[in-house]
Image (cartoon, rainbow, N blue to C red):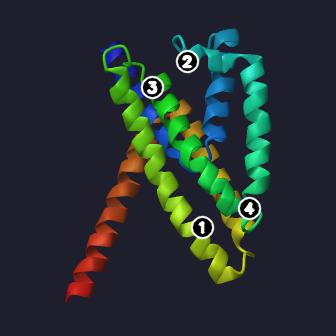
Amino acid sequence: MGEFLAGISGIAAAFGLSTSAGLNAYIPLLVVAVVGRLSAITGWNLINLRQPWDTLTSWWIIGLLLVLMVIEFTVDKIPAVDTVNDVIQTVVRPAAGAVLFAANAKVVTDVHPVLALACGLLLAGGVHAVKATVRPVITASTAGTANPIVSVAEDVLAAVISILSVVVPILMAAILIIVLTTLIWLMWRKRARAAA
């Protein structure tokens, strides 16, 4: 039973972290790297990364992720530059989601690695596609003045989702399911009203 719950917990964490990567690739990677490193040092056992994913816990990788996160944090606040950043991140965010899903699905040995990578790629890619579509509209409608506010909100959301996905993954999965179900219901309702 404990092994089953660990598997469910790992899958839930993988879903949350991959979703978060669609907003900011480096925040969930950094959370996983730091918590994985602390887990190895303290014995917390929050994250137990298997090879080759345990490479994320290297101090060099943590430092690199920190630098990349600061760069992304900065450029994502500047109108027009954030659009260029979103184009670059079209490759990075889905790749980060794929890595996070494969690294955190504790049942990855029972699930084909290609399936785990594809799930993470689709989750992060889907969130990124929505973000990359909405941000230019926000930039145009507010003349770029809302960009820093929206970007900070996205970063905070990515951090909260990442931390909750590691600490209480089942709760995070439940929240994601509720939010997605609500969004689908609202879109269905809007189409039904438009048709009527």
Residue positioned most to the bottom: 196
Q: Which of the two residues, 48 or 111, is positioned nearer the viewer here? A: 111
Q: Which mark is residue 39?
A: none
Separation of marks 3 and 4 at Cα, in angstroms: 31 Å
Whether 19 is drawn above or below 108: the answer is below
Q: Which of the two residues, 88 or 178, is positioned nearer the viewer here? A: 88
Separation of marks 4 and 1 at Cα, in angstroms: 11 Å
Q: Mark 2 belongs to which amino acid?
A: Trp
Q: Which of the two residues, 159 or 146, is positioned nearer the viewer here? A: 146
Instruction: Provide the residue designation for mark 4.
Output: 81
Q: Mark 4 belongs to which amino acid?
A: Val
Q: Mark 1 belongs to which amino acid?
A: Arg
Closer to the eye: label 3 or 4: 4
Pointer 4 local density, CA inside 10 Å: few below 14, some 14–19, many at least 20: few
Q: Quadrant of residue 190?
A: bottom left
- SS state under label 3: helix
Pointer 3 local density, CA inside 10 Å: few below 14, some 14–19, many at least 20: many
Instruction: Provide the residue designation for mark 1.
Output: 135
Q: Tag 2 or tag 4, which sits nearer the N-term?
A: 2
Q: Tag 2 or tag 1, which sits nearer the N-term?
A: 2
Q: Tag 3 or tag 2, which sits nearer the N-term?
A: 2
Whether 80 is drawn above or below 55: the answer is below
